[in-house]
Amino acid sequence: WNFVTHMPHKKSPIMLPSPATKLTHVRDSDLAAIAMNDFGVAVFDCSSLTIVRYFGGSRYNKSPDSLGRMSHTCPISDLQFGPDGRKLFTSSLDGTVRVWDVPTGLCVDWMSFSSPPTSLALSPTGEFLATSHVGRLGISLWCDKSFFRMVLLDGTPNEPAKMNEPCPVAECEQEEANDAIVTASVSSILAKKEDMMAFDDTNGEDENDGSPPQAKGEGLITLSGLPPAHWKNLFHLELVKERNKPTEAPQKPPSAPFFLQWRAGLESSGADTAGATDQENAGGTSTTDMTKGKEATTDGWDAVWSDDDADDNAEADSSNGANEIKPSKESTSKPTKRRKVVHHRSKLAELLQSCFDAKEVLSMGETYSDVTSYLSKMGPSSIDVEISSLCYGIHDLEEGLPLLHIASMWLLEACESHSSFEAVNAYLHRFLHVHGNVITRMDQAVQKTETDLTSDEAMEEEDDPQTLKLKEFVETIAQLQKKQKEASNRLQGKMQHSICLLRHLSRMV
């Protein structure tokens, strides 16, 4: 019908093979699915006003072999498109739900229920399917397995998949029924888990060995396979922190308990001293004994809390003098040295330094693979803390500059390897966001030094180790920028080529 003229369209009426019973429309693709009386479905293109697909129906009623396999055998109770308009879900009173692939016109899934479904509905993402059944008060909720793992489709199914239908809690009248349902559900879940593990062992031995995916060819990129929240939140970490910021400061509770630590034998109050004097006069313990106990207790606390190395050395000397042990000539000629303890500012800094020290032993391209693997096991906030601890500002260049240089070498190697592409780019974005101000100021300092100094001063400046490290770091950052830009342009070119090719093929159909 034409809304302007209130008259039928010039191409109407459109004749159907059988009378229509239900209709649903998807706005994105402008398609309408029409359930017919012959148990089939016709897909109608509202733009061209033509029927583009037939699913089941009278054309299969002539062949008994394909009647139950390619079409419903009872009236269709409900139908609905998927969110993207590529799948069509139909439920029938024959106790089955079918999933049709609209582009190919094939039935890709076939589910059977003990009670015929009366209606169905899909979630906005297509992840969940809700169905209602004859004789049941509850609503069954089903989850699409293809959202969580790879599902292989081998053409049209030859037989329906029997679905387990646990009874809703509202319909259970006895506790024994509840226990039986829970037992059956647990056993079915364990059976499905064993089947999935067996399938993974037979078909996915190479993919589930714990190692990162390898590229099929030279120059191809690989994804990390990590959850999207791991690397997506790194781009919006400030927004996440702002949302999680408390609205008000924590308040002190009205009656806060206050605990005092007590240790036996430690007497400090004047009342206790007076009591001890009375006890001494009465013939009890003497004040000197109590003083000795107090000094022993105080020495115990000093031993715990004292951090003065001089006291320890003095005690060691006094103990040696008491035992009258004279050092030998060998001990005096070879003084012992205390082992130097290196404290790293973070686990990431320690890992970067160890990989840098062992880069001559490891093969090319795998020097800093442990760093990427370490960050992949952490959350966005922990990654931000680790990257921020490499350098705390322009005043921390004495210790922070070597760590920044090693981190830039790690990112350069990761960009050249093309592995874990999305995660590495997220780490690079966070690294530049945190230390971008320091990198910019160092780049400006190097350029100013090269322009202002004369030839003799430049020769002297080049001999400075700090200046050499600064120039090496700036050169590494320039190489990193070049490699990242090349990879990004190449990926955008491939995607643009694929989009143009798809548009061309879609116009040919």
Image (tube, rainbow, N blue to C red):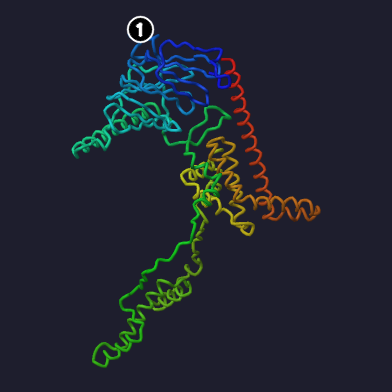
Image-quadrant location for residue 496: top right
Residue 145 image offset from top left, x and y in percent: 39, 30
Q: Can residue 70 be seen in this view?
A: no
The front one of 220 and 470 is 220
Residue named by callout 1 = 63
Where 15 falls versus 187 (above or below)? Answer: above
Image-quadrant location for residue 197: top left
The front one of 155 and 160 is 160
In the image, farthest residue toward the bottom: 281
The residue carrying pointer 1 sits among few (fewer than 14), some (14 to 19) or many (20 or more) residues within 10 Å by Cα, namely few
Residue 478 image offset from top left, x and y in percent: 67, 43
Residue 295 image offset from top left, x and y in percent: 36, 81
Residue 369 image offset from top left, x and y in percent: 51, 41
Q: Report how many numbered discs are placed on residues in the image.
A: 1
Image-quadrant location for residue 453: bottom right
Where 6 falls versus 176 (above or below)? Answer: above
The front one of 449 and 222 is 222
**Element on which disc 1 rests:** loop
Q: Which quarter of the rendered picture does the C terminus lie within?
A: top right
The front one of 315 and 370 is 370
Is residue 445 shown left or right of residue 203?
A: right
Is residue 263 shown left or right of residue 101?
A: left
Q: Can residue 135 be seen in this view?
A: yes
In the image, farthest residue toward the front: 6
Disc 1 marks a residue whose amino acid type is Ser
